[in-house]
Amino acid sequence: MCIVIFDGDNTLWNTNAVFTEAQLGILEELRSFGFNIVPKDEFDKLRLIDDMLIKKYKKHEYNFRVLCFALYLVYKNKLSEEEAMQMAYDIFDKNIKYEDLDLAEKCYDVFKNKLKQIPSLFNNVKKTLKYLNDLKCVLILSSEGKKDRIMKILDEYDMEQFFVHVSTEEKSIETFKKIISKISKYQETCSKKVF
């Protein structure tokens, strides 16, 4: 028997496709405000600001209203991506009142609604998980995504049955040690570990 630890996002299911559509939704909403932009042509600009905010917040899931407002500032005030990101970050971090924040909220609502889509599974995921279960492998899902979102995806595809443990903590050596200690009853019969 073996222990296999999987990530979910972009390993078992295609989160990037849903996220890309949601981010394009932000740009489409900005276009509806009268900005002369072609969303697909502006996508690299959005991803640049997103990357800067990921570094700033030190996590991938941050307050995406900041991204929405930073993009608005790029198009409205003709700021550079870096200037707009910093200004939007400061406004939200310091809770500063600023005109047009309601437009960022509208963009965020579009983004949030599009993110509710369930991502598609990659090819043969369920078949592979079943095969590993049949081999008596202990399967663990370790994701840094929000627990309710991860559980919704598992439920949609009836995949919770394959995993003995689902963790939504930040990945670290300590997290993996904690996971392994929780499943120690399976370790005794395990001859090989696959991580």
Image (spheres, helix red, strand yellow):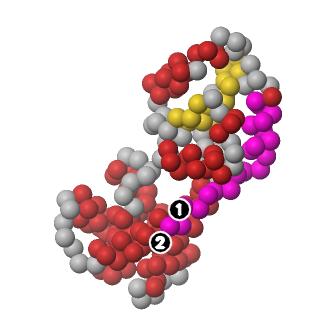
User: Position of 179 compared to 194: left or right?
Assistant: left
Where are the magenta residues, as a range?
113-133
Check residue 59 for magenta coloring. no
In percent of width and height, residue 35 lies at: 42, 86
In space, the residues marked 1 and 2 are separated at their CA atoms by 9 Å
Of residues 151 and 167, the one nearer the viewer is 151
Residue farthest to the top, as pictured:
188
User: Given the image, on which type of amino acid does mark 1 rest?
Assistant: Leu
In percent of width and height, residue 122 lies at: 72, 51
Q: Quadrant of residue 52?
A: bottom left
Residue 86 visible to the viewer: no
Nearer-N-terminus badge (1/2)? 2
For the residue carrying disc 2, how many other residues have a C-alpha within 10 Å: few (<14), some (14-19), or many (20+)? some
In percent of width and height, residue 79 lies at: 31, 75
Residue 12 visible to the viewer: yes
Look at 34% across and 64% down and name the residue there.
66
Rendered position, 39 above or below 65: below
In percent of width and height, residue 13 lies at: 65, 50
Of residues 55 and 80, the one nearer the viewer is 55
Look at 69% across and 45% down and name the residue there.
158
Report which residue position mark 1 lands on.
Answer: 115
Report which residue position mark 2 lands on.
Answer: 110
Rendered position, 22 above or below 193: below
Q: Quadrant of residue 99?
A: bottom left
For the residue carrying disc 1, how many other residues have a C-alpha within 10 Å: few (<14), some (14-19), or many (20+)? many
User: Given the image, on which type of amino acid does mark 2 rest?
Assistant: Val
Look at 78% across and 36% down and name the residue there.
130
Look at 31% across and 76% down and name the residue there.
102
The quarter of the rendered structure image containing the C terminus is top right
User: Position of 179 compared to 153: left or right?
Assistant: left
The label shown at residue 9 is none
Q: Could you say whether the residue bearing mark 1 is in a helix, strand or loop? A: helix
